Each structure stands twice: as C-alpha cells, then as structure tokens.
Amino acid sequence: MILTDFDYVRPGTLAQALELLGTGSRAVVLAGGQSLLVDLRTGDTVLEPGSALLVDVRRLEELRGIRRTENGSLRIGAATTLAELAADRRVLDEAPALAQAARANGDPQVRNLGTVGGNLAARGRATDLPAAAIAADARVLIAGPAGRRSVPAEEFAATGAPTGSVVTALTVPPARAGAFVKTADRATRYPVCAVAVRVGPAGLRIAVTGATARPVRLRGVEDRLRGTDLGTEAVLAAFRAEPRDRFTPGRGTSAEYLGHLAGVLTARALKRAQHLANST
C-alpha cells in the first residue's frame, strides 16, 4: 500500500521533464524507484496529498548509456542501471571502484531497476556509488532552471541537486587502480561502512560512506599515508589518528568500532587496487 496519493507523468524529453519539475515542490523525480517508492510505501517520504507529481525520467534517451568524452573521460548517463554499470567493460577497466560499488548494491532486481542518478541523489540513507564517485574524482552533471553545470561528486554528496533539477550524468576520468569494499547491513544491504580508493600518479584518494554522516573524502588519512607502503599497519595507524567524531554511530555500532572497520576495509581496498594496477 502506497501511503501518498500522486499523479504520474513520463515526459518524452529532458526539456519537458525540467518544465514539469519547475512547477514547484509538488514535482519529484522518479528514476529507478528503488528508494522513492519504498519511502512512499513506508511514509518516510510524504508528498503533498492530491497534488504530488512523479516525473519519470528513466526512459529519456539523453540520460542513458555510457560513452567516451572528448577529454577521454567516461560519461555515464544518470538513467543507466546499476546492472549496466557493473557489467560495462570500459567501467570495469577504467573505473573499477564504480563497477564494484554498483555490483554491491542490493540484489539483481535492485541492480536491474536502480539507476546511477538515483543512487547518487538518494537522501536519508547511505548508498554505495557516492563514495566510489568521490574516490574516482568524478563530477556530477546537473540540468535545471539555471542551466547546466558540473560539480565534483564530493560537493554533490554534501548539497544534492537543487529543487527542479535533474542529474543527467556522471563523468569519470580513467584510473585503473581503484577498488570498493563494503560491510553491508544484512537486512537492507545498505552499507554499515563502505570504502572506495584510487591509487595513481595523481595521488591517493579515499572516500567512505555508511560510517559517516554523509559520503566524505578522508584527506587526513590520505596525508598520513603519504610516503608509506600503504600496508595494513600503516593504514590502521592512519585511521587511529582520525578524530572519532568523524564517524557516526548507528544501530549497534560505536564511533570507535566504525573507525576501526573503515581502516580494515581501506587496507583491503588498497590491496585490491594495487593488485589491479599490477595485473594490467
């Protein structure tokens, strides 16, 4: 039973979708529906009765597909499903942390319906792609009333999309040495703690989600690991020095536990990333 009444429309173009979303707070973007429809059913998302409008963007051609950009990055359309992302050869080779994060989401049904844009834009729950996008130095493309713009994934994780806007794509610079590792809640498959890393000439990037209030890059840990062998002991020492208030206790967890878990997962992710780098 859905607890909120709403109207539904499937626009034929992105311009039509933006026009509908411009009608005000009554309009909400519907992509894969794996978060929104659940929240409507449980009442965690409450839309204004009798006037709510779901704008279904999942079949807009402009939002689909994965292609190469002129500067060599991958452009991943927001309506690309998590299953498509996880299976794409270019993503597996050039953005492995994103592919691994997509594969870690839920079950096959969730991955076949859930979308890249929906996973990035989900609010009120930890999802996997934002941390992988931050570690990959990706940018989120947004279309809205003020036009089109591109923002770093880390900034998007903090602010989200402005009202009346649509996430159109994710752009990712190629980097073979990346990895994503997750400890999931057994019931929901949402991350208790998930870590994504990238290792390369541009430096080390580490991002975490689930254990923190929102997906964040751990610059302090990165700085402490500079010049080390990136081994397990060095990683755990770097995390022991991280302020405990960085981590947000959840059901049955403490900040101390989450900080240690984040360190263990980071050490595993770095080993996986280094293995990928050495095998290419």
Image (cartoon, rainbow, N blue to C red):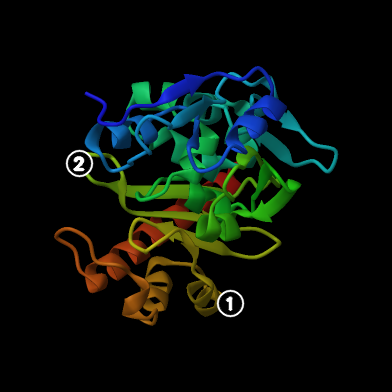
Q: Which residue is mark 2?
A: 186
In the picture provided, is 169 more to the left or to the right than 205?
A: right
Question: Is residue 280 in view?
Answer: no
Crowding near pointer 1: few (<14 within 10 Å), some, many (20+)? few
36, 273: nearer the viewer: 36
Figure quadrant of the C terminus: top right
242, 153: nearer the viewer: 153
Above or below, 225 against 210 in this view is below
Q: Amino acid at mark 2?
A: Arg
Q: Amino acid at mark 1?
A: Gly
Residue depicted at x 47% and y 29%: 53
Residue depicted at x 14% and y 60%: 252
Are the residues tagged 1 and 2 within 8 Å (C-beta)? Answer: no
- Distance from the alpha carbon under mark 1 to that under mark 2: 37 Å
| Residue with the most extreme right position | 70
Q: Give percent across and percent down for residue 86.
A: 50, 30
